[in-house]
Image (cartoon, grey):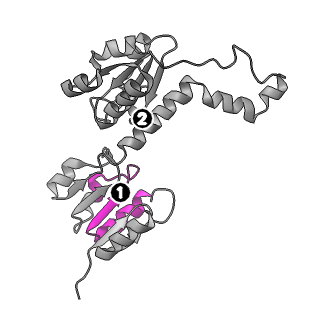
Amino acid sequence: MLVKPRVFITRELFDDVMQRISEYYDVEVWDRYQAPPYDVLLSKVKEVNALISLLSDRIDCGLLSSAPKLRIVAQLAVGFDNIDLECATRRGIYITNTPGVLTEATAEFTWALILSTARRVVEGDIFVRFGEWWRLKTAWHPKMLLGIELRGKTLGIVGLGRIGKRVAEIGVKGFGMRVLYYDLRRDLEAERELGVEFKELEEVFKESDVVSVHVPLTPETRWLVGEGLLRLMKKNAILINTSRGGVVDT
């Protein structure tokens, strides 16, 4: 009888996915909502051939070195800054991720944040939920919770990858916005197709009414957005960061 390879999954996945994996692997799943503690993860990887991980799992060299049978870490995310890639390479362990899977979802969530901020949706929700309209004896006033009309405004994109490009496309086609972008490489195709304009990073922050950040967290991008760039922004500009928190120096 053929022995199935063993896999440890750090969170419970959807039923159809689990069923498919179980056809090929001897599966063990961490069934709690929170991430498994590091010491638990360390003990679980000692005998497995594969690991399915999330961003909140610390996959460092100590963990990889304690897993002599481990051949692959499949990361359920686009990013992989939680994994020691150099150590994995030395040990011959494959690392995979899931680019493209969450592009649309992340772009939509970015726009949810932009719209909720520009239109002060959260403040309005609190106003109603906590009865402020009743306390003030008014449900509407011409100056109440005035937001920003996005049509015709300038959107700045920092990082024109898959997600950044989709956010830019929605800005151009959905809201008629002028879109500026900064990236390490110019995207001439996006400039032709979407009409986006390449600018230096400082100019993006200076000219934009909304700045949306879409870069990976690396030593070069940590604290990329700091006091210097923030001081360049317009008084009422909006900053949206759906990258890692460490990209913005708060």
* Residue found at the far bottom of this picture: 1
Q: Which residue is mark 1?
A: 53
Is 209 on the left or on the right of 161, as rendered?
right
Is 196 on the left or on the right of 145, as rendered?
left
Q: Which residues are magenta?
A: 37-63
The x and y percentages for residue 21 are 33, 70
Are there few (<14), some (14-19), or many (20+) residues within 10 Å of tag 1?
many
Q: Amino acid at mark 1?
A: Ser
The part of the image, by quadrant, that contains residue 163 is top left
Residue 185 visible in image: no
SS at mark 2?
Answer: loop
* Residue 56 belongs to magenta span: yes
Q: Earlier in the sequence, mark 1 or mark 2?
A: 1
The disc at residue 242 is 2
The x and y percentages for residue 99 are 29, 46
| Residue at image point 39% right, 33% down | 246
Residue 98 visible in image: yes
| Residue at image point 29% right, 70% down | 48
